Image (spheres, rainbow, N blue to C red):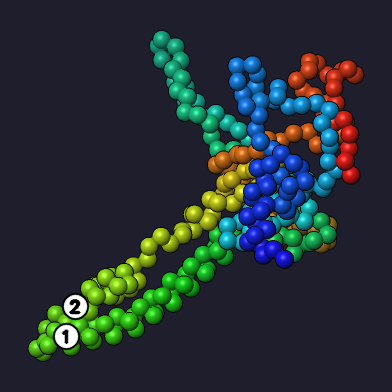
Amino acid sequence: MASPIDNIINGLTNATTTNPNDSFGGFSSQPIPSADGNGLPSSKVQNYRVGQNTRSLISWFVPEFGVIQMYINPKNISYADKKLINKERTKGGFILQYWGEELTAITLNGTTGSSGIEGINVLHEIYRAEQYAFDGIGLSLAADNANQGAANQIIGGIGNAIGGLASGTSVGSDIGGYIAKSLFGTDPASQALAAQNIPSLAQYAFGVEMYYLGWIYRGYFESMTVRESADNLGLFDYDISFNATERRGYRLNNLPWQKSATNGPSGYNIPLSFGGITL
């Protein structure tokens, strides 16, 4: 039986394939068609392709914890894109400065349905997962510093013995301190472990990914609001704000009645997106 780590690696590998069956946790990523002088990426999408009847739930990839699926999709998802353009009025007209695009702002709102407060617990733990991920780092640092303190005392004592010191001198302690620094990477002044390459809270917070119907958004959570109402006993509503620093994949039609958007105005003669449904 494959380990959870193997499943995650296989899922992330399959997420770049074109086969909808090659998915992990309910998601797959379509490659983006190339844009060239003959048309935009959307013009390269084939019509009458085979459809797949699957239940598409949003999946979150959380650093150190793997992939977590939502119990129920949000009621609404909004994607807000904005160009960063500064405009200034002068006597000769407007001066425009184009700075590219703002981060994509994704807003999710809905209810946890029959999962109730336990569904909120899952969403809240995903929202602040960097705090849980850093707990292990903090405990490891504390244990390393404690062990290092004992080692420093031993090495300092050896240094004092080697130095053959007179009363009131500190050469032996300095020798021990610098031996510890050379062997273990400690700071001679504080005798504490000099941490190197330790993941930060920001590294964990900015590494969250959202998978949904072929789109993969990588970014960070900005806010989360939970509402409990006495009128709907047991139902909990939530609003989540997620800022995306990167988008991968390409989302295509997934419903049988949807038609091609690149064959002219809508009408009865427009080709359907799918020519068959695979159960």
Residue 277 occupies quadrant: top right
Residue 33's place in the image compared with 126, above or below, is above
What is the C-alpha distance between the residues marked 1 and 2? 9 Å
Residue underneath mark 2 = 175
Q: Which residue does the image show at 85% across and 19% down from the upper left?
A: 270
Q: Which residue does the image show at 64% across and 16% down from the upper left?
A: 38
Q: Which residue does the image show at 78% across and 17% down from the upper left?
A: 263
Residue 124's place in the image compared with 263, above or below, is below
> What is the count of numbered marks?
2
Left or right of 41: which side holds 20? Answer: right
Front disc: 1 or 2: 1
The x and y percentages for residue 32 are 65, 33
Q: Please indicate, yes or no, whether residue 83 appears anywhere in the rendered image.
A: yes
Q: Decide which of tag 1 and tag 2 comes sooner along the chain.
A: 1
Q: Please indicate, yes or no, whether residue 107 appears anywhere in the rendered image.
A: no
| Quarter of the rendering occupied by the N terminus | bottom right
User: SS at mark 1?
Assistant: helix
Residue underneath mark 1 = 162
Name the foreground residue: 77 vs 258.
Answer: 258
Q: The residue under label 2 is which amino acid type?
A: Ile
Residue 141's place in the image compared with 234, above or below, is below
